[in-house]
C-alpha cells in the first residue's frame, strides 16, 4: 500500500518519494501546522485528508481554489475525504427543509466529482461523506457533550472568531461550530485537515482539544484567502460577483468584463488571484500529466500564462513563466486590464467546458441540479397584497435574501445564476456569506 | 381512562374531580405557570409530569422534599416521569466513568421506588427514564442543533442564571443545559415539568422556545427552595450537613444535634423547613390513606406535628395543627431548639425505617448501592511520593473533592456518608453542589 514499496508501478503517484509527496502536498500554501508528523507518517504510508463544505448555495467558481489544491493532494497519493456538511448547512439556514439540503449535497458531490474528472484525476482516492451520516450518532454526541464540558464560551468564541460573526451575544450554534469541526477530524479518521487561513483558530482549537478526549492531534494545512473575481468578498447579494459552474461562455464574459480590476493593482485583484490560485496550478498539473497542449491559457510549453495583447490597446502577446512574473508585469502597468480579462475569460471557459459537457450528458447530474435548486415560483401578487411591508433586509434569512436577489437579478438583467451561497468552503472568501447567514439568523 | 368517566371505582384517585386533582397537584407550591392549560387538560384526561435528577452523589434526605411533592401528583392521578439524567451527571463529573454513572442511576431508581413504597404509593404511575436512552438519538440531536441556532449565548446564560455558575466565561455545557431541559419536556411527552423556583428561568426559556420548534408549550410547577438541615445550603464538603437515606438512627441523631437551629429563628432553619416540606405533607398523605396512627411525629389525629417538651428544658407536649402554628410558636421562643431537634430525629428515623428495611431485605438494592458507591481504596502512600504537591482545591474535580472530603471525614470522625453530590435535583438547595461541580470543571 505504501508508495515506497510499490515504486516503479505505472501510476505516477506511486513513484514519488515521501519527501516529494510532502513537497506537493504543501506547495502554494499559506501555512502548515504539524508538518513533521505528516513527514513521519509519509515514511510509513499515504495520508488521509479532510476538506469540508456546507452544501447551501450554488457552488461557484471560487470553489476551484480549494479544489485545485485538493488536486495536489490526490497527485501526492492522499486519500481525500470531502465532508458534505449537511447538518451545518441546515443549521445555517433553518428555512431550507432538510430534503433540500440533502439534494444540494448530492449536487455538490456530482459537481466536485466532475471537476476532478475534468482534471483527469482518479476519483478512487476521493471519498464523499455526508455529515448527517455520523454527526447524529451516540458516540459523536457524547464526544460533543464532553467537549462542551471542557470548552469555555470564551475559548469557543475565540476559535470561531474569523468564521463566525462576532457579535456581543453569538448564537450557541456558532459557539459549537469549532467543536464539531474538531471532532470531524477524529470521526473522519484523517491525518490532516485543509482549509483557508480563516480556519486557523478552529484548527489550533482542534489541536489543543482532541488530545483532551484522548484523540490524536492532527496536522493543519491552510490556503491563503483569495478574493472574489470582482475584488473583495464574493457577495450573495451581487450575482455578478460570482460565476456559476454552469454559466455560459457569454455569461462568463459579461461577468468578467464587469469585474473590478484596477490597472496596476495586484492586491485584492480577484482576476489575478484566480489565475494564481487556480489557472496556473491546474496548468502545472496538466503539464505533469503530459497534457500541456490542452492548456488554453498558455500557448507554449515553458510558460504558465499567456496574454494575447489586443492591438487596439496597443498590446502584444506576453508570456509568463510564473504567477510572480505575471503580477509584476501587471503592477508595472505593462498589462491592460482588458487584456487580462480576455485571457481570464478564455481560461475560465476552458476550465468550465468539460464540466458543462459532463452536465449536459448526464441525466443524473441534471436531475440533481433541478432538485437542489428548483426554479423560484414567482407568484403574481394579487392587488390586496400591495399593502404588505417588505421584510427589512437585516431580518431576512439567507434564503430569502437569495430569493430576492435572484428575483432582482432576473428582472434587471439577462444574466442568471444569482443564488445565495453560505457555509463551509475553505480557502476562498465565501466566509462572508457564512457570516451573513449566521447574522441573518441571529438578528 | 379519564378520571371523570371512571368515577366511583375503588381507587381513591379516580373519585377525584378535575378541580380536586388540580388543587392537590398545585398545593404547597411557590409558583404555577400555565395552570389554565392543566385545568383544561384535566377535564379530558389525567396529566403527565416530569421531574429530573442527575445521579451523581448519594441521594440525601433533601430528596424527600421533591419526592413528597411527587406523592401529591401520584395521588392526583398524574403519571410521573422521573428522568435519571445520566448524560448530565456524566458531564458534571467527567472523571466518573459512564458505567459508574449508570450504576448510580440504578441505585437512584431503587431508592426512589423504595421511598414511594414507604409512602404506600403505587409505582404504576411512576416511570423512570434514563437520559441516555433518548438524548443521543438523531431526532433529539437535530432538535438540539435547531435550538442552538436560534438561542443566543445571552439568552442561554440568562436561562441558566440560577442553576449554572455565573462566571465571565461559562462552559458551553452550562449554556446547553437549559436547551436540553426544554427538549426533555417534548421527548418525555409531558404536560408539565416540576422543579425548584431556581429552575424558573429555564422553565420560561422552555415555554418560549419549544413552540419555535413547533412543539407544545408546557406548564411549570415550582417548589420553594428549602434550606439544608444544618441551615443554608447543603455542602458536599460538610458531611454533617446532609443525612444519607441509609444513616443509622444514631447517626441521624448525631447529625441533627449538630445542626444549626438558632432559637426563635424560622428563616433559614433547615429543621423547621424539613418538617414543613416533608414531615407534615407526608403526615397528611398518610391521614388521607387512613394511616394517621402511623405518623410517629403526631400523637393525635387532629394535629400535624407534636413536640414532646423535655422537662429538663422546662417544656411540655405541644401539638400543632399546621406548619404555620409550629413556626409561629418557634418564632415566639415557645419551643426549645433541643426539643424541636428531638422531634425531628424521631420523624426522620420513622421516615427512613421502611426504606432501610427495604434495603436490608433486598440483595438487588444492596448490590446496586455497592456498585454505585464502591468503597474508596485508600492506598498507603510510598515514601517517595511524599514530594507530591496536592492539587489546589479549586482545580479538583467534584469527585476528587468528594474523595478527599470522604477521606478526611473518615479519618476525623466515625460518622459516614461523606460523599459528594452534584446535579439536577429540584426544589431543594442541592444546586449549590451543581454550581460547585461546574465551577470545579471550569477552573
Image (tube, coloured by chain):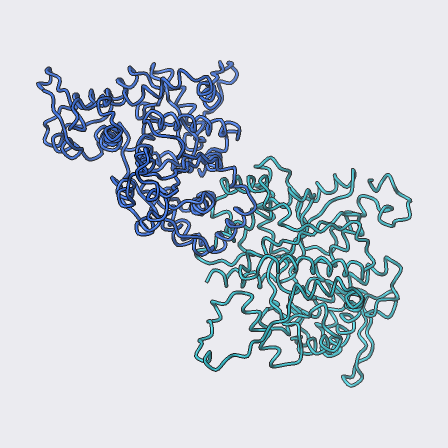
Chain colours: A cyan, B blue
Work out which quarter of the rendered image holds the N terminus of chain B and state it: top left
The answer to whether residue B99 is left or right of residue B71 is right
In the displayed structure, does residue B306 sit left or right of residue A242?
A: left
Left or right of residue A245: residue B151: left
- Give above or below for B215 relative to A257: above
Question: In the depicted view, which residue is nearer to us: B349 or B253?
Answer: B349
Q: Is residue A351 visible?
A: yes
Quadrant of image for the C terminus of chain B: top left
- Percent of width and height locating residue B363: 46, 17
Residue B429 seen anywhere in this rendered image of the structure: no
Tell me where residue A84 appears, x and y as whole percent.
Answer: 66, 54
In the depicted view, which residue is nearer to us: B389 or A65? Answer: A65
Residue A224's quadrant in the figure? bottom right
Left or right for A214, reference B133: right
Q: Position of residue A43 (x, y in %)?
A: 79, 39
Q: Residue drawn at (73%, 50%), measured in percent from left and top?
A: A127
Q: Residue at x 47, y 71 (%)?
A: A391
User: What residue occupies the far left of the structure in this picture?
Assistant: B314
Residue B128: percent from left, percent from top:
44, 34
Is B285 situated above or below A92?
above
Quarter of the rendering containing residue A267: bottom right
- Please identify the residue farthest to the front as the structure is shown: B8
Foreground residue among B175 and B283: B283
Give the number of marks.
0
A238, B393: nearer the viewer: A238
The residue sitting at 69% across, 62% down in the picture is A63
Amino acid at each position: 500500500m505504501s508508495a515506497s514499496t510499490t515504486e516503479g508501478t505505472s501510476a505516477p503517484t506511486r513513484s514519488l518519494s515521501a519527501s516529494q509527496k510532502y513537497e506537493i502536498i504543501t506547495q502554494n500554501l499559506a501555512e502548515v501546522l504539524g508538518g513533521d508528523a505528516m513527514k513521519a507518517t509519509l515514511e510509513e504510508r499515504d495520508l488521509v485528508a479532510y476538506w469540508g463544505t456546507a452544501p447551501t448555495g450554488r457552488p461557484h467558481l471560487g470553489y476551484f481554489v480549494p479544489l485545485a489544491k485538493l488536486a495536489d493532494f490526490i497527485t501526492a497519493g492522499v486519500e481525500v475525504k470531502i465532508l458534505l456538511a449537511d447538518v451545518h448547512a441546515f443549521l445555517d439556514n433553518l428555512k431550507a427543509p432538510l430534503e433540500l439540503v440533502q439534494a444540494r449535497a448530492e449536487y455538490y458531490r456530482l459537481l466536485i466529482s466532475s471537476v476532478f474528472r475534468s482534471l483527469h484525476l482518479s476519483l478512487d482516492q476521493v471519498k464523499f461523506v455526508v455529515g448527517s451520516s455520523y454527526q447524529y450518532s451516540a458516540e459523536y454526541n457524547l464526544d460533543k457533550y464532553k467537549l462542551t464540558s471542557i470548552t469555555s464560551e470564551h475559548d469557543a468564541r475565540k476559535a470561531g472568531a474569523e468564521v463566525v460573526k462576532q457579535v456581543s451575544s453569538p448564537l450557541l450554534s456558532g459557539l459549537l461550530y469549532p467543536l464539531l469541526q474538531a471532532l470531524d477530524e477524529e470521526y473522519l479518521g484523517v491525518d490532516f485537515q485543509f482549509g483557508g487561513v480563516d480556519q486557523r483558530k478552529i484548527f489550533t482549537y482542534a489541536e489543543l482539544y482532541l488530545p483532551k478526549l484522548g484523540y490524536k492531534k492532527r496536522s493543519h494545512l491552510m490556503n491563503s484567502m483569495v478574493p472574489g473575481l470582482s475584488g473583495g468578498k464574493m457577495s450573495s447579494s451581487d450575482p455578478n460577483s460570482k460565476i456559476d459552474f454552469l454559466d455560459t461562455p457569454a455569461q462568463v464574459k459579461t461577468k468578467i468584463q464587469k469585474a473590478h480590476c484596477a490597472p496596476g493593482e495586484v492586491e485584492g485583484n480577484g482576476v489575478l488571484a484566480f489565475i494564481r490560485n487556480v489557472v496556473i496550478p491546474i496548468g502545472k498539473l496538466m503539464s505533469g500529466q503530459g497534457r500541456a497542449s490542452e492548456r488554453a491559457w498558455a500557448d507554449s510549453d515553458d510558460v504558465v500564462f499567456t496574454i494575447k495583447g489586443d492591438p487596439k490597446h496597443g498590446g502584444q502577446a506576453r508570456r509568463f513563466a510564473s504567477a510572480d512574473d505575471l503580477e509584476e508585469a501587471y503592477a508595472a502597468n505593462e498589462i491592460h486590464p482588458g487584456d487580462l480579462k480576455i485571457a481570464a475569460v478564455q481560461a475560465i471557459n476552458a476550465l468550465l467546458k468539460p464540466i458543462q459537457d459532463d452536465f449536459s450528458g448526464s441525466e443524473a447530474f441534471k436531475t440533481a441540479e433541478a432538485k437542489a435548486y428548483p426554479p423560484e415560483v414567482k407568484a403574481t401578487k394579487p392587488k390586496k397584497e400591495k399593502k404588505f411591508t417588505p421584510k427589512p433586509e437585516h431580518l431576512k434569512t439567507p434564503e430569502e435574501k437569495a430569493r430576492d436577489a435572484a428575483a432582482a437579478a432576473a428582472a434587471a438583467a439577462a444574466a442568471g445564476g444569482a443564488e445565495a451561497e453560505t457555509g463551509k468552503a475553505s480557502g476562498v472568501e465565501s466566509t462572508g456569506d457564512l457570516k451573513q447567514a449566521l447574522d441573518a439568523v441571529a438578528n
